[in-house]
Amino acid sequence: MQVINSLTFKLSTVSLFSILLSLPIILLAHEENNANVVKKDINVDKNLPLYEVINSSYIAKIKPILEKKCFDCHSDATKFPWYYKIPGFKQMIDYDIKKAKKHIDMSKDFPFISHNTPLKDLESLRDVVIENDMPPLRYIIAHWDARLTKSEREAIVKWSEESMSKLREIRYQ
Ligand code: HEC
């Protein structure tokens, strides 16, 4: 058992480092593909009363989940890992955070700060959760408890869809 444990540990450490080391290539390749996807910030009327309704259910049910599992990249409340100090890792992590926040910055609750409309953000939140795309694998490898549980995924999908239909009812973006 001891042997297996230490072997698993060694393997996971090795895979963590090899994945992190290959990140610049993955990230740079991604950057090129996505160059035109990230549009400039759009102007959204944040005072729509319905946003406040959606935001209060967000704060009660969804924010606690995202705070634990997504805020390291998608907010100003990043808890940096110990290897952030290692040259090379810092640049990769900074790049990841910059990229993540450009897509969706959750620092100021809902509506998120984003290059998209709140409705589109809810849609992509739902989609990444259904597809199990977030948090990225490279992050889960270093943060064993970061994967979303089944009930967390269900809660996020349910909340996104309910909020989307509320917005669609008033034909808002
Ligand atoms: C390690 C950093 C990191 C963590 C942690 C992370 N993300 Fe992301 N996220 C990214 C990056 C980088 C992008 C930009 C797209 C890409 O490169 O894949 C992104 C993009 C997104 C998008 C936009 C996708 C699109 O199509 O525009 C959503 C939604 C999202 N993340 C949700 C989440 C959720 C929900 C969590 C937590 C469960 C999470 N992310 C955790 C790095 C992260």
Image: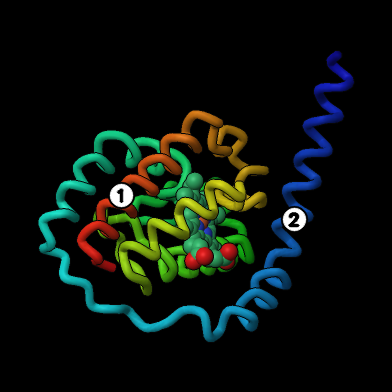
Q: In the depicted view, which residue is nearer to us: 80 or 77?
A: 77
Q: Is residue 106 left or right of residue 172?
A: right
Task: Check disc 1 and report its element: helix, strand or loop.
Answer: helix
Residue found at x 73% / y 72%: 25
Q: Determine which quarter of the picture holds residue 110.
A: bottom left
**Residue labelled with disc 2:** 19
Say what secondary structure mark 2 lies in: helix
Sort mark 2 into few (<14), some (14-19) or many (20+) by Cα contacts within 10 Å.
Answer: some
The quarter holding residue 85 reads bottom right
Amino acid type indicated by mark 2: Ile
Residue 30 position in % (x across, y down): 65, 74
Q: Quadrant of residue 35?
A: bottom right
Q: Position of residue 81 (x, y in %)?
A: 53, 47
Is residue 96 visible from the viewing direction of this image? Answer: no
Q: Would residue 3 be visible to someone looking at this image?
A: yes
Q: CA distance from mark 1 to mark 2?
A: 36 Å
Location of residue 4 with respect to 26 vertically, above or below: above
**Sequence-first tag of 1 and 2:** 2
Q: Nearer the viewer, residue 88 or 143?
A: 143
Residue at which label 1 appears: 163
- Give residue 26's position: percent from left, percent from top: 71, 69
